[in-house]
Amino acid sequence: MTVQNTALYERHVSAGGHMVEFAGFRMPTHYTSIVEEHKAVRDRGGVFDVSHMGEFFVSGSDAEAFLNKMTVNNVAKLVDGQVQYSALMTPEGGIVDDLLVHRIDETHFMLVVNASNRHKDYDWLTSHLEGDVQLVDRSDEFSLLAVQGKDAYKLVVELADQDISEMAYYNFLFQGSLQGIPLIIARTGYTGERGFELYVRNEDALRLWDLLFAKGEGWLKPIGLGARDSLRLEMKFALYGNDIDMTTSTIEANLAWITKQKKKADFLGKEVVLRHLKEGVDRLLVGFELLDRGIPRHGYDCYVGDEKVGVVTSGVMSPMLGKPVGMVYLKPPYCEEGSEFDVEVRGRRLKARVIPVPFVQLEVPAR
């Protein structure tokens, strides 16, 4: 597969970005250090190039009904300019992807999907098309900048040509602009901090990047994928391929809150969801801290005595807490807050304990 550069590739290189291949793109993992960039976002703000994400546009008189069938959340509850976190599921209950559904109007929607799942998602949706629905993949037309952090949030508000100071969390402006640069402005995020996602045409991406850093000169930092991962983990935001995948249901992943089993429309995987809610599940995704010295990693097995009780999905040394935390699928008897278990790390058993999430309580949360 050909590896692509985003429209901002040269800016990353000139800023000292350490470039790696990720989801078919050359992307920066970090510029200085992951910890430094992580703390910069928590302190004031930073900018992530996440142009590798996918943007699908769904239109037609049956678009809402189609999306309500394909996703677990209730699309019918959306109003114009509102965003919904949701998931695509198989009839067997596996998660095809987690995604964001944006309602432009009653017959037009924008879906934002994970980069690694873009083609899989498009094929999945296309294979289920019915009625008056058009699905168009416009991912290659857009660059996406995530501007996150309390001061970065204020910066975008100041630069916007529209008054977005009162824009609610999980809302968006389809026809917005910053200093004359046309873009879609959304108030979502993957860090827990206040911020915006700016969807801009590729030909305007460099101008937008330069505008942001000129306005935030001296404090606004470019942030790589490494800090994006540690920031999301401190909030217990799931990462597809680590914490959720085709083998996990939304109920097992503790995503019952986005799974509207009582909505009028049936959705793919609903029978499994109803069974899991009625009968319970064999595992649940919960947060934990490591009590012994070490770093929990994806795939590490967990034990209580000689019984294997789960597996770690994500782990990090939290820059804000100074201790290792992570996510783990555990058998329900061991999921209660305060329950202890062992994580096997390179042949050693390290003590761990289930704790509340999110791991970090923010001074200025996104909401």
Image (cartoon, rainbow, N blue to C red):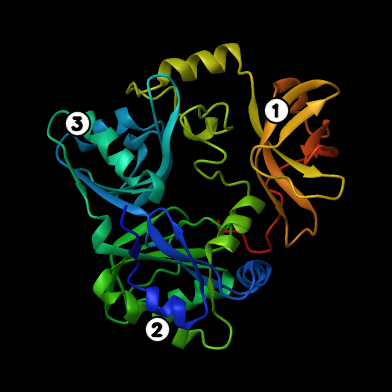
What secondary structure is found at the residue carrying circle 1? strand
Q: According to the image, label 2 marks what residue?
A: 210
Left or right of 153 on screen, residue 42: right
* Nearer the observer, 246 or 165: 246
Taking the image as shown, residue 157 lies to the left or right of residue 134, namely: right
User: Is any atom of residue 159 visible in this view?
Assistant: no
Q: Quadrant of residue 329?
A: top right
The picture quadrant where one finds residue 318 is bottom right
Q: Earlier in the sequence, mark 1 or mark 2?
A: 2
Q: What residue does disc 1 label?
A: 310
**The disc labelled 3 sits on which kind of residue?**
Leu
Q: Quadrant of residue 242?
A: top right
**Residue 339 x %, y %:** 82, 31
Contact between labelled residues 2 and 1, with CB atoms less than 8 Å apart: no
Category of crowding for the residue at label 1, using alpha-carbon neighbours closer than 10 angstroms: few (below 14), some (14–19), many (at least 20): many
Q: Which residue is mark 3?
A: 129
Mark 3 vs 1, N-terminal side: 3
